[in-house]
């Protein structure tokens, strides 16, 4: 028998909730809630990412698309004043905060996915010939030969696959071999792949956001 008190029937409710649309506060794009990063503002006016999207209170949402990230300024964050009392300027602090919290989240996710990890060049290459969705994490300090091999294999898989998240292959380089290894409870890992679907999407989203922020920092420092 179905219970409808909201706790015992969490699966259908989750599905319904995930389809809900929200508008990105910065670029005004409407997207499914699950593809946006929820932000909350605490009593001190500090803005925090809420990855679980479950913290109480009203939230605001960011899409973290590349163009969106580049367009965010403290002035744009000012729209939060409609519902909250954010301390501004705060964008610089918030970027750093999002990055650090994404790193933590990434480590947690990787740690929870230890058992599904396909580790090492041969095992990963083998997976790449399969047509299943695949997220490949390549260490930032992986050797040139390995990077080339992984990229070649990716190109050989149908290129069009990459476009839709979760249905293709994605290669991300965020952590060096030592950090990647430690997140997965191993020694150094140069390359690892994940094929499981549902945590994969989350991992992919976190990795992509993380990488965009990272690129943005690199750009800001280059200026
Ligand atoms: Zn946006």
Image (cartoon, rainbow, N blue to C red):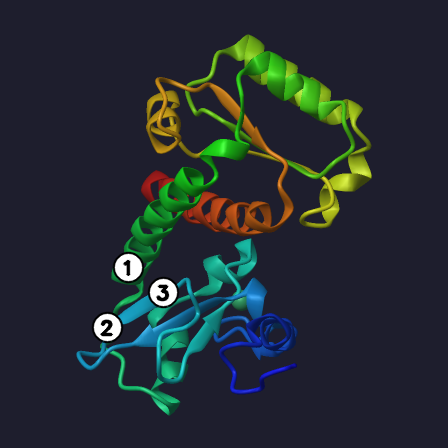
Judged from this view, the residue extending furthest toward the bottom is 82
Q: In whole angstroms, how far apart are the C-alphas of marks 1 and 2?
A: 12 Å
The answer to which of marks 1 and 3 sits earlier in the sequence is 3
Quadrant including the N terminus: bottom right
The residue indicated by pointer 3 is 49
Horizontal and vertical percent position of residue 64: 50, 59
* Among the 4 quarters of the image, the one containing residue 65: bottom right
Depth check, mark 2 against mark 3: the one in front is 3
The residue indicated by pointer 2 is 46
Q: Is mark 1 within 8 Å of ligand 1?
A: no
Left of 82 or right of it: where is 166?
right
The answer to which of marks 1 and 2 sits earlier in the sequence is 2
User: For residue 17, which numbered disc appears in the image?
Assistant: none
- Comparing 62 with 222, the one in front is 62
The residue indicated by pointer 1 is 92
Judged from this view, the residue extending furthest toward the front is 1
| Residue at screen point 42% across, 49% down | 213
């Amino acid at each position: 028998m179905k219970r409808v008190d909201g706790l015992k029937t969490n699966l259908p409710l989750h599905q319904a909730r995930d389809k809900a649309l929200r508008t990105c506060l910065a670029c005004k794009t409407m997207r499914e809630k699950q593809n946006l990063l929820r932000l909350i503002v605490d009593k001190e006016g500090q803005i925090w990412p809420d990855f679980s999207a479950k913290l109480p209170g009203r939230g605001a949402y960011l899409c973290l698309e590349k163009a969106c990230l580049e367009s965010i300024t403290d002035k744009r964050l000012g729209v939060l004043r409609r519902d909250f009392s954010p301390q501004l300027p705060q964008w610089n602090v918030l970027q750093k905060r999002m990055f650090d919290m994404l790193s933590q989240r990434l480590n947690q996710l990787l740690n929870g996915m230890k058992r599904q990890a396909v580790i090492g060049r041969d095992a990963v290459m083998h997976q790449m010939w399969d047509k299943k969705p695949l997220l490949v994490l390549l260490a930032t300090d992986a050797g040139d030969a390995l990077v080339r091999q992984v990229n070649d294999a990716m190109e050989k898989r149908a290129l069009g696959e990459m476009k839709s998240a979760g249905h293709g292959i994605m290669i991300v380089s965020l952590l060096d071999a030592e950090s990647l290894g430690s997140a997965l409870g191993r020694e150094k890992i140069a390359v690892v792949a994940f094929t499981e679907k549902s945590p994969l999407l989350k991992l992919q989203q976190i990795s992509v956001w993380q990488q965009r922020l990272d690129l943005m920092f690199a750009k800001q420092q280059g200026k």
